[in-house]
Amino acid sequence: MTLTELVDLASKKTNFTELADYIEFGGAFWDFTARPGAIQAEIVSRNETQYRFLWALLDRTAVVAKIEPREKNSG
């Protein structure tokens, strides 16, 4: 899936009606980011290093994704 296709998919809330839709999108996003050259930059927050911002260029417009970790179990 291309970045344009990912943005189009994410822009329509009707594409996310079931949990499986979110899981499928997440997989497509990770597949995209795994391709060499797909991400131009990765910014890591200084204070909260678990927050990462991925920078990709789409038709001269930056697309930034904020990646947050899952909460850790407190047990």
Image (spheres, helix red, strand yellow):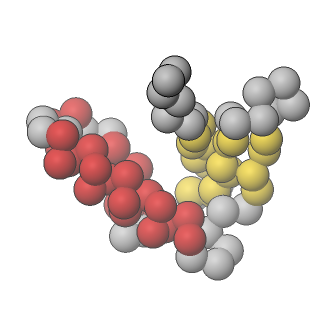
Viewer-nearest residue: 54 or 51: 51
Residue that extends furthest to the bottom in the rendered view of this protein: 36
Q: Is residue 45 above or below residue 25?
A: above
The residue sitting at 37% across, 70% down in the picture is 1
Residue that extends furthest to the front in the rendered view of this protein: 75
Q: Is residue 70 above or below residue 23?
A: above
- Estimate the x, y position of residue 46 in percent, counting from the top left: 87, 31
- Estimate the x, y position of residue 6 in percent, counting from the top left: 38, 56
- Estimate the x, y position of residue 12 in percent, counting from the top left: 24, 39
The residue sitting at 67% across, 74% down in the picture is 37
14 sits left or right of 31 in the view = left
24 sits left or right of 19 in the view = right
Q: Is residue 13 above or below residue 10?
A: above
Q: Is residue 1 above or below residue 17?
A: below
- Estimate the x, y position of residue 41 in percent, counting from the top left: 76, 56
Viewer-nearest residue: 29 or 13: 29
The quarter of the displayed image where residue 22 is located: top left
Residue that extends furthest to the right in the rendered view of this protein: 46
The quarter of the displayed image where residue 10 is located: top left
Q: Is residue 35 visible?
A: yes
43 sits left or right of 6 in the view = right
Q: Is residue 6 visible?
A: no
The residue sitting at 66% across, 49% down in the picture is 54
